[in-house]
Image (spheres, grey):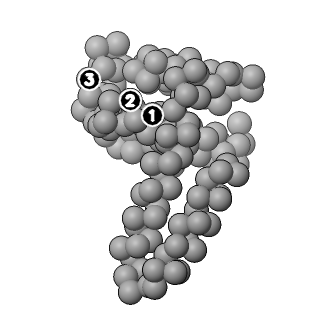
Amino acid sequence: MTEDENGAAAADLARRLRLLLDVSIAESGAEPTYAQIASFLEARGANLSRSRWTYMVNGHRYVRDPLIVDGLAAFFDVDAPFLLGEEGAPIPEKVHAQLDLVRSMRAAKVKSYAARTLGDVSPKALQAISKFLDEDMTQT
């Protein structure tokens, strides 16, 4: 695997992990903690350091350790091929079912951030930003 391919695979894995974290939030109302994930993996014989988890979820390194990949897939209740982004791997039903909610949650976060960051922006401008984000999320 070339350096570019490795970087692309790391970014794809990070996107999938963040999606699964968002799906977990949508299902349970809370994001799984690093401690919960690490404990689950440890019970399966895999060691996930905090720095390795951070690298993975931020797309800085591609981790291919089968114990970690299989453990994460089991934790999030998905197949390992989906987690790794293998061609032809189906999107798990629970992920597919939550995608609209996850998109809405992400858009709401962006809207809230924009409103806080932009401060003294007119209501009309905030409405335009909100409309743009809604349209963008619909297209995605």
Amino acid type of the residue that numbered disc 3 sits on in the rendered structure? Ser
Q: Vertical placement of 126 versus 84: above or below?
A: below
Q: Decide: marks 1, 2 in contact (CB < 8 A)?
A: yes
Instruction: Residue 32: give x, y in percent of width and height.
Output: 31, 34
Q: Decide: marks 3, 1 in contact (CB < 8 A)?
A: no
Amino acid type of the residue that numbered disc 1 sits on in the rendered structure? Val
Amino acid type of the residue that numbered disc 2 sits on in the rendered structure? Glu
Kindly identify which residue carries mark 2. Answer: 27
* Disc 3 versus disc 2: nearer the observer: 2
Q: Vertical placement of 107 versus 54: above or below?
A: below
Instruction: Residue 102: give x, y in percent of width and height.
Output: 49, 42
Q: Residue furthest right?
A: 88
Count of numbered labels shown in the rendering: 3
Q: Residues within 10 Å of mark 1 (few under 14, many from 20)?
A: many
Kindly identify which residue carries mark 1. Answer: 23
Relative depth, front residue between 25 and 83: 25
* Residue pictured at 65% horizontal, 30% vertical: 85
Asked if residue 15 lies left or right of residue 4, the reply is: left
Relative depth, front residue between 35 and 42: 35
Q: Decide: marks 3, 2 in contact (CB < 8 A)?
A: no
Q: Determine whether the residue tagged by mark 1 lies in a helix, strand or loop.
A: helix
Q: Residue 10 appears in which quarter of the rendering?
A: top right
Kindly identify which residue carries mark 3. Answer: 39
CA–CA distance in space, label 1 to label 2: 6 Å
Q: Determine whether the residue tagged by mark 2 lies in a helix, strand or loop.
A: helix
CA–CA distance in space, label 3 to label 2: 20 Å
Q: Vertical placement of 53 versus 27: above or below?
A: below
Q: Residue furthest top?
A: 44
* Residue pictured at 44% horizontal, 56% vertical: 108
CA–CA distance in space, label 3 to label 1: 20 Å
Q: Vertical placement of 63 versus 113: above or below?
A: above
